[in-house]
Each structure stands twice: as C-alpha cells, then as structure tokens.
Amino acid sequence: MTGNADDNTSAKTWIKRRFSATTVLEIVLVVYLIVFVVMPLISLILSTFENKGVDSWIAVFSSNIAKNLFWIPFKNTLIIGIVVSIGAILLGGFMAWLVVMTDVPGRGFLGTLASFPYMLPGFAIALAWASLFRNERLGGIAGFLTNWGITIPDWLAWGVIPIMITMIFHYYSLAYNLIGASMASINSELVEAAEMTGAKRFGILRQIILPVVSPSITSSLLLIFGTSIANFASPALLGMPVRYYTLSTRLYGTIRTGQMGRGYIIALVMIVAATTLLLVNEKLKKSRFSFATLTGKGSRQKRQSLGKWRWPCYCIALLIVTVTTILPGITLFLASITRYTNSLRGGLTSHFWFGESVANIADGIPGLFRNPEIISAAKNSFLLGLIGGIIAVMLGLAIGYITNKSQHRGMRSLIAIFSYIPMLIPSIAFGAIYIVQFGRPFGPFPALYGTFALLVLAGVAHTLPFASQAGRAALSQVSAELEEASVVVGAGLFKRLKDIYMPLVSGPLLSGAINVFVKLARDLSLMIMLVTPTISLLSVKSFQYSSEGFAQLSNAVTLVVSVISVSATVLVHYFNRKSQPWLVKG
C-alpha cells in the first residue's frame, strides 16, 4: 500500500512539474501565435497556388499586363522608398543636430514640434497637401492656391513629387527621434577636445558626430525605407486619382476588384522585401563598429556654438516645423470650415462639424457631431483601440514573463521569434493575410470578414511586436529575488503576475496600451483591407470621404484622429516620465 501511495505521489509531482502554470502559459502563447500569426502567413503563401494560382503568378510577373500590374508600381515604390528615406534622414538628422547638439534658440519649442508629424495619421499631411495644391486636372475640387488664382502644375498637385514630399514630412520626425536619442548620448568632452585642437564646427560634425551616430542613421534609413514602401495613404490620395500606382495601392486595388490571387502575390512580395530589410539591419547591427561615448566619470552637456549661424539656423528650423507641423494643422482646420470646398471667398461655416442634414450640401450628409455614421465609426475606433490595447498588453506581459523567467530555452526562443513575425509584414499585407485566413470558416472560427472581431484579432496580432517588446523590457527590470520570495510563500503564477509584476510595471504597461491604442486608431493601411460598409472606423471614413469628394468632412475627421493621436502620444510620454523618474532632468 505504501509503495502505491509513494508511486501516486511521485506521479502527481511529475505531472505538477511538467504541467505547471508556466508551462500551460507557454503552450497557450505558442498556440495563439501559431493560429493568429504563423498560420495566416502560411495560408497566404498557399493561397497563391490555389485555383489556378500559377496563372496569377504569370499574370503578375510575365504576362501582357505585368508591366502595369506589377513592374511599374514596383519601380515607383523603390524610387519613393529611396528618396523618402534619404530625405527624411537629412531633414531629421539636421533637426536632431540643431536641437540636441547646438545652442540654437528655442530648442524645446523646435524639438516638440519636430516630434509631432510622426504622431499624426499618415494621411493627415497628404490631405493638407491636397487641400492646398490640388489643381483642376480632375475637374471639380481645386485647392486653396488654385482658388486664389495661382496656377499649380500637375507635377506639384499629383503623382510622385507630392507623394515623396508628404512622406518625407511624415517620416523625418521618426528620424529626428531616433538620431536625436543617439546624439544625446555623446559625451561633450569629445567635442571639447576637438575644439581645443582647432577643429571647425562642421569638421566636428563630419568627423566625430556622424561616425558616432552612424548606427542609428543606418537603422533609421532602413526602417523608414521599409515603412515608406508599404505606405498606402499618400499614394492613394495623391497618386491613384491620376493612375500613379505603388505596390500598396495595387494590392488594395486587386483585392477590392476580386483579383485575390494577384493581390496575395503582391502582398507576398512586400513581405519578402520588408523581411530582407530587417534582416539586413540586424546583420549590420552585429557587424558595424561601435563607439564608447559614455564613461564612468561624470560628464556635462556643452552645446556647440553656432556663432553667426545661430539665428539663420533657427529660421531654417522654424520654417521646417512650420511647414511640416503648423501649416498642415491650419490647412486641415480651414478646409473643414469653408462653405465652398477649399475656398475662402464663400465664407466660413461650422456646418460640416455641427450642421444637420441639408439636401443640397454634401449630398445631405450631416456634420461630424450629428452624423450617425461618424459617431458609429468613432465608437468602433475607440473600442478597437481600447480592447486591442488591453489584449495586446496582456499578451505582451505574458510574453515578457516567459521570455525573461521561463526555464525552457526552446519555448522562450520560439515565442520570441513568433511574436516578432508581424514586424516583418507591412500593414496592408497583414490585412490581406487575415482576409485569406479568416475570410472563410477556419477550424472553430466562422467566416469573420466584415465583423468587429476580425478588426480586433488583426489589430492585436499586428501590434504584438510592440506590446511584447514593452513587456520584455519592463519585466527585465524586475529582480528575480521577488519571484523567488513569492514562490517560497506559495504564490502561483497568476497571483505573482497580478500582485507583483503588474503593479511594478504598470507605467510601462499603460504606455504600451496607449501606444497600441494610437496605432489602431490612426492605422489606415491595415484597416482599409478589413472594413466593410457595415462596420467602419474614423481613419477609413476620412479616406472614403476624400475619395468621394467630401473634402470638408474628410478634413474634419482627420483633425479628430490627429488630436486623439497626439493627445494619446503625449500621455504616453507623461507616463514614461512618471514610471522612469531618473530620466527627468532637474
């Protein structure tokens, strides 16, 4: 009897050890990542070979229509990516150098405004550009400048030039933040030593500062190139009306017109391109030289003196932030309150914000705050951001715990790799793979296309890399001693997560949730593929109104999304400073 009891006890102990709460959590995470990340990607690849899929491959790459369907958009995409990434690096790097390294006046003011463009939805600057520069090539709606009697050439109103300019204005802010953070770590003693040897200010910039920040410049260049080639908003608003196509707009067009196989192949090409860029970036990170700029000795920040260039540089920087931040906001607001589209001659009106339905104005569409479609889209956007943010951050916390605390090295690596995959997939292509996977019944899931659930599932999966990175970074700061002490007193996994980890990392988690909220609230590229007439979001309604010629309504909606994005991003910075007070300078 005793032997049987001992055997039963040892068996229970073995089962408990093998199937602990941590193991169960690992299994749940792996299953989730396989179902919602890995399998949709596999389904996309397989679907390109289904139903005469070979014909689709031929049509895309070597048929009579391949030139217009793929090769010209592919060339356009590469040109835009190269020019935008170089332009954004030059503009963002210049602003970072001025604000971080020099004594230019108004650094705080300039730095704050330089951070704004990337907070805005990608279509905000494109809409502002259209409101200013649109000419009468397409008939009907013209921009402010044309209505003032200024002749705007086609090349400035439509096509590749305005697309590249608006994207540079959007992405330079990202380069400013990344390069500025790298410059802030440079010890001013290096600059002082160079000045003592007689080095000129631009020689210091070229021979000391640029080599030190070159890793962040390279990373920024590749990141901006990868995101710009997947950008949908600017090419759609400024290129599609004149038949100027990129891969993202071709993907959208083929899916919307029922050419699913061709669209999936284009999505696959975009995924391969984005993956290649990220792998190249990772390889460069490992191979490039690094410089030790911070030492154990205290250092003081001394800014380079610009001398006679101080005020000219300030004027240049002020012009940059005015054109990229202040002017688009003013333009969108004015364009939303003009009685006649983009014309101040007819006077101003609040109808498109607060007016009731009038048959001869905007086809009877009521103002923003009286429009049931907009109110419904706003509710959907808010719920999507809220639910998606909560779920994504909870998953991020779980992934962070497993990758930091799990004893199973294989499971840690598998979860880390799978959670990183969505980073490799451009937003519009990610929408395509979710149409493939969940547009039809799949296992226990019914066909989800056209449902709010699909928006949540796709949004959570696509933002998972950001949430998991936040979870890993936050939990890596928690001492292992707390975990050991809680295990000694018998606290289970979920009690430890709830009572120990969540209170300690609540600041970073909240910041992560708000970041996800912002990404989902303003994301047009992902959601444009998934919404239907029965369910919509603010970002999609803005695009639809613009496409239908209701410019005032489109600009008003875009302003609302922009205010939400900027406010939420500022809130993130506030919570980051609260949770990391050592970063706040006295």
Image: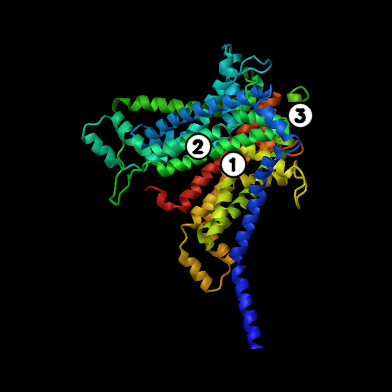
**Residue in the image at 67% along x and 88% along y:** 1
Classed neighbour count for the residue bearing mark 1: other residues with Cα under 10 Å, few (<14), some (14–19), many (≥20): many
Of mark 3 and mark 1, the one earlier in the sequence is 3
**Residue in the image at 66% along x and 39% along y:** 431
Q: Residue furthest bottom?
A: 1
Q: CA distance from mark 1 to mark 2?
A: 17 Å
Classify residue 577 as left or right of residue 260.
left
Q: Are marks 1 and 2 in contact (CB under 8 Å)?
A: no
Amino acid at circle 3? Ser
Q: Position of residue 554 (x, y in %)?
A: 66, 29
Classify residue 380 as left or right of residue 389.
right
Question: Which label sits in the foreground, 3 or 1?
Answer: 1
In the image, residue 449 sits, relative to residue 157, either above or below, namely below
Q: Nearer the viewer, residue 236 or 222?
A: 222
Q: CA distance from mark 2 to mark 3?
A: 45 Å
Specify the quadrant of the image occupied by residue 12.
bottom right
Q: Are marks 3 and 1 in contact (CB under 8 Å)?
A: no
Q: Position of residue 168 (x, y in %)?
A: 51, 28
Amino acid at circle 2? Leu
Instruction: Identify residue for label 1.
Output: 519
Q: CA distance from mark 3 to mark 1?
A: 32 Å
Amino acid at circle 1? Lys
Of mark 1 and mark 2, the one earlier in the sequence is 2
Instruction: Identify residue for label 2.
Output: 223
Instruction: Identify residue for label 3.
Output: 357
Q: Secondary structure at mark 3?
A: loop
Q: Position of residue 19 (x, y in %)?
A: 62, 67
Of mark 2 and mark 3, the one earlier in the sequence is 2
